[in-house]
Image (spheres, helix red, strand yellow):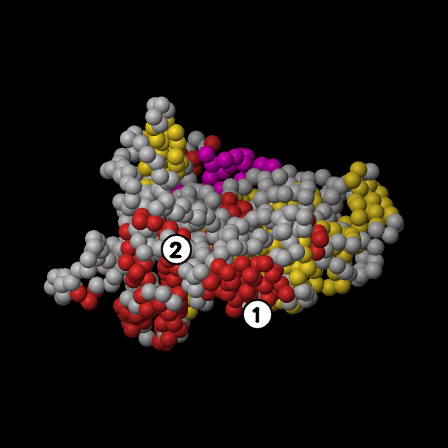
């Protein structure tokens, strides 16, 4: 199994070598999950050559190289016919948008190298049950080609030996129902209905079990869909060219497209139908990593609930999250899940270490986490318990499991707000009609400060309309611009609908297609595409004219999205050019705008982003603490509202606009001892502003109306160090560690006692300290700063639980719990 860059060369009469074809040879993954034709040949076509000497140079070899044979033939063959019939799939888990796109084929130089369609005879009726062929052979030379259907050989996994068998036919509704009844149906029969309170969904994980290209009834479905008989084109599956190389490619395109359609309709749709019959819903990851033959958006349409996934480390999630959120948005599913924090590393992760990756998922449109993974722990004396290599340990033996409520509350708050309303996005990127397809492409590039969804032909044909110059879906999600893929092929039905939407007021960006990829209605389908394209792009050649008005809409060509959006008058939805590491997502529920911001860097940020919201009061909602602040630090501008914000390293924040802003001046700048300083200023219910300070000195507020307010000689007490010894108890450390005196605070790994040096779990630190009388003042907070914590802390004062801290800064207000004189501090 290996991959290499190849160069096919021919030797001229003068002895020199010349390259005639460069190509990639990739048979690096021999698993049947990436195609049932494990040893399928790599077939390359090239222009006719005359020579006795040829050679192939292999460069950049990856893997253990070895060849069974190299066959050089004068017979014409369909290039890459193994891959084009789904016999061999993309060898790695994340096929990009062009993984199953091939260039227009080169036609053979001579007609005798092509098989005419009328030279293909179906003689199946002449084959007897015992395998004897009785056929009165016509004059001439004939090749008898027998084509049959067989299982791909893929087996389900992971599963116990008793539960392992051949994968179900994904294009056969009856087979899917049989599979359901033989597995989940057996479970349901053993569960009385009154005990089925928690069982709500069946789960279909990411598709990882290889391709297929035929099923019972496929011939009839093919004829109904495309209007011609695929059996007469089956020799193409052996590489032979029927009619022309282009028409042979079109047959293979039609086959792949029908496979994708039936996998979505018969497998996903079939699972959903039988689940609904048992009052269950289908939860689906709408993509696949190994041999996925479908189209990721359409594949999710039949489910009730979609999910992406992301791993705790690495880049898996880079296309899966947007696959799920885009499909959910275009098919009207408000909750978008993610299989969250898969893949370890084992026994080292904790909530703050996971936060950055989780917040990034929110910015990709996810609003519900399914924590991966909780494994049942049957033994009390075996800790940290059973684990899987592919999961983070969200189970009761995890050392921080009992202290995770505050982090779970953070997730809950984020999920609740992000599940409100509809996503706000300006761009819809059409993924094209080619299959298989696991992701789209953002070309031209998406400008900073705008959001997008991928959209497919099914949603455009059956769900999209235009209102007020926006492309609108039934659930209310809308887009300003539809971007077409950089492809020369589109079926006439889709192009006709795009022309209608543009005429109704939509804006389209892209070049005109010149042909259909399908053989349905060939060659008239190409003429239909050309006529439709000529009408829409008549005044837009992309050179002298890059924009043209088409009835109520516009068509653009050969222009960047930033220029196009400026031309339409769309400013960025969220603009923070000074902080590219800040990601965002925007939801709108009625008249309420909800922005989620995440700082993906390890540095503190003081920023003043511009939000595309006018005339509303910004509120800062802290998902970590649940605190909400009506901020006074904003300015209303022509392009939106500029809000002064502070974001901690890996920090996150919701900025909510729900009420009209008052006409009172806002605070545009804060000064400390004459120097500009970013300080929080909130608006109280009585309309007054409140400045929060932590250092003594002189403060000044500058207002948008030109006013100034100076606060001189503000007194803030100096920090009070908690000196002296701490009594420490190691909860799971045995009797010898139940009461240890630490003279100072230090890392356990520096302790001379090996039982403490290698301890993993919870320790309780306790201290008695005095609090002077007269320290309480109105408007003053008393902050406890724990400094460097590894990795979480529960704080209690005088027996009262105060806070559960899981991220820096580990600071909490303990003022309400203090008493004059002796106080008991307990930190777990």
Residue 494 image point, x, y percent? 52, 63
The answer to which of 139 and 764 lies nearer the viewer is 139
Kindly identify the residue that appears in the image at 60 percent across and 37 percent down: 723
Residue 127 or residue 27, whichever sits in front: 127
Give the numbered dot on residue 474: 1
Nearer-N-terminus badge (1/2): 2
* Picture residue at 37% right of the left edge, 75% below the top: 277
* Mark identifier at residue 800: none
User: Which residue: 74% across, 51% down?
Assistant: 642
Q: Label 2: how many residues lie within 10 Å, few (<14), some (14-19) or many (20+)?
A: many
The part of the chain drawn in magenta is 723-749
**Whether residue 711 is situated above or below residue 459 in the rendered picture:** above
Residue 679 appears left or right of 523? right
Residue 290 sits above or below residue 333 on the image:
above
Tell me the quarter of the image containing the N terminus: top left
What percent of the width, then of the height, locates residue 553? 66, 62
The residue that label 2 is drawn on is 247
* Residue 727 painted magenta: yes
Question: Does residue 36 appear in the picture of this structure?
Answer: no
Q: CA distance from mark 1 to mark 2?
A: 38 Å
Q: Position of residue 532 (x, y in %)?
A: 56, 62
Residue 190 visible:
yes
Mark nearer the viewer, 1 or 2 = 2
- Residue at 83 percent across and 60 percent down: it is 663
Q: Is residue 337 toward the left or the right of residue 471 in the image?
A: left
Residue 781, x across and y down, in percent:
70, 50
Residue 129 in the figure: left or right of residue 108: left
Which one is nearer the viewer's eye here, 337 or 556? 556
Q: Is residue 290 above or below residue 527?
A: above
């Amino acid at each position: 199994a290996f991959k290499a860059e190849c160069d096919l060369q021919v030797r001229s009469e003068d002895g020199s070598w010349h390259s005639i074809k460069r190509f990639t040879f990739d048979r690096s993954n021999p698993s049947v999950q990436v195609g049932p034709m494990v040893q399928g040949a790599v077939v390359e076509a090239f222009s006719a050559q005359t020579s006795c000497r040829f050679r192939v140079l292999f460069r950049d070899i990856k893997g253990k190289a070895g060849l069974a044979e190299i066959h050089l033939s004068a017979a014409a063959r369909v290039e890459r016919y193994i891959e084009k019939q789904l016999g061999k799939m993309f060898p790695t888990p994340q096929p990009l948008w062009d993984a199953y796109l091939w260039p227009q084929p080169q036609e053979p130089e001579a007609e005798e190298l092509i098989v005419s369609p009328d030279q293909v005879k179906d003689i199946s009726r002449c084959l007897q049950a015992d395998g004897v062929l009785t056929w009165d052979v016509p004059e001439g030379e004939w090749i008898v080609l027998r084509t049959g259907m067989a299982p791909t050989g893929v087996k389900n996994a992971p599963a116990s030996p008793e539960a392992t068998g051949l994968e179900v036919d994904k294009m056969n509704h009856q087979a899917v129902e049989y599979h359901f009844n033989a597995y989940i149906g057996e479970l349901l029969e053993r569960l009385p209905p009154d005990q089925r309170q928690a069982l709500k969904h069946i789960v279909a994980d990411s598709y990882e079990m290889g391709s297929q290209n035929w099923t019972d009834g496929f011939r009839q479905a093919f004829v109904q869909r495309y209007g011609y008989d695929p059996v007469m084109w089956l020799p193409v599956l052996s590489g032979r060219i029927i009619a022309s190389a282009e028409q042979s490619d079109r047959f293979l395109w039609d086959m792949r497209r029908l496979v994708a359609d039936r996998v979505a309709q018969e497998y996903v749709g079939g699972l959903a139908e039988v689940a609904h019959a048992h009052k269950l819903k289908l939860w689906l990851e709408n993509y696949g990593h190994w041999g996925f033959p479908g189209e990721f958006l359409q594949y999710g349409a039949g489910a009730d609930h979609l999910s992406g996934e992301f791993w705790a480390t690495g880049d898996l999630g880079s296309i899966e999250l947007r696959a799920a959120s885009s499909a959910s948005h275009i098919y009207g599913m408000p909750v978008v899940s993610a299989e969250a924090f898969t893949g370890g590393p084992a026994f080292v992760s904790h909530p703050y270490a996971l936060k950055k990756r989780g917040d990034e998922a929110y910015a990709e449109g996810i609003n519900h986490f399914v924590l991966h993974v909780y494994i049942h722990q049957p033994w009390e004396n075996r800790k940290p318990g059973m684990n899987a290599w592919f999961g983070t340990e969200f189970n009761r033996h995890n050392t921080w499991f009992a202290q995770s409520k505050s982090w779970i509350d953070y997730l809950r708050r984020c999920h609740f707000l992000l599940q409100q309303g509809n996503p706000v996005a300006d761009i819809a990127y059409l993924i094209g009609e080619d299959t298989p397809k696991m992701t789209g492409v953002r070309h031209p590039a998406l400008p900073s400060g705008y959001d997008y969804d991928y959209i497919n032909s099914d949603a455009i044909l059956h769900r999209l309309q235009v209102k007020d110059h926006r492309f609108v879906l039934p659930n209310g999600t809308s887009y300003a611009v539809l971007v077409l893929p950089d492809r020369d092929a589109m079926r006439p039905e889709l192009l006709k609908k795009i022309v209608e939407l543009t005429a109704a007021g939509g804006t389209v960006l892209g070049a005109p297609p010149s042909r259909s990829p399908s053989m349905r209605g060939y060659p008239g389908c190409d003429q239909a595409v050309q006529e439709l394209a000529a009408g829409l792009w008549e005044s837009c050649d992309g050179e002298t004219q890059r924009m043209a008005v088409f009835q109520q809409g516009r068509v653009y060509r050969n222009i960047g999205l930033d220029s196009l959006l400026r031309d339409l008058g769309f400013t960025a939805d969220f603009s923070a050019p000074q902080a590219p590491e800040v990601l965002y997502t925007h939801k709108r529920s009625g008249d309420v705008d909800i922005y989620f911001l995440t700082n993906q860097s390890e540095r503190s940020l003081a920023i003043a982003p511009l939000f595309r919201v006018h005339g509303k009061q910004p509120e800062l909602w802290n998902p970590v603490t649940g605190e909400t602040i009506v901020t006074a630090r904003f300015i209303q501008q022509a392009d939106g509202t500029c809000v002064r914000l502070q974001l901690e390293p890996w920090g996150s924040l919701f900025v909510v606009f729900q009420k009209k802003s008052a006409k009172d001046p806002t605070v545009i700048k804060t000064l400390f001892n004459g120097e500009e300083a970013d300080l929080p200023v909130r608006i109280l219910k009585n309309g007054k502003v409140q400045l929060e300070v932590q250092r003594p000195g002189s403060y000044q507020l500058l207002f948008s109306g030109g006013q100034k307010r100076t606060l001189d000689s503000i007194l803030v007490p100096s920090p009070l160090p908690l000196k002296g010894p701490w009594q420490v108890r190691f909860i799971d450390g045995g009797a010898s560690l139940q009461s240890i005196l630490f003279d100072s605070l230090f890392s356990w790994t520096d302790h001379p006692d090996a039982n403490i040096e290698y301890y993993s779990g919870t320790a309780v630190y306790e201290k008695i300290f005095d609090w002077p009388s007269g320290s309480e003042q109105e408007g003053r907070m008393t902050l406890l700063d724990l400094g460097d914590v590894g990795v979480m802390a529960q704080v209690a004062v005088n027996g009262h639980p105060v806070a559960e801290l899981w991220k820096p800064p580990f600071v909490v207000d303990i003022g309400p719990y203090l008493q004059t004189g002796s106080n008991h501090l307990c930190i777990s």
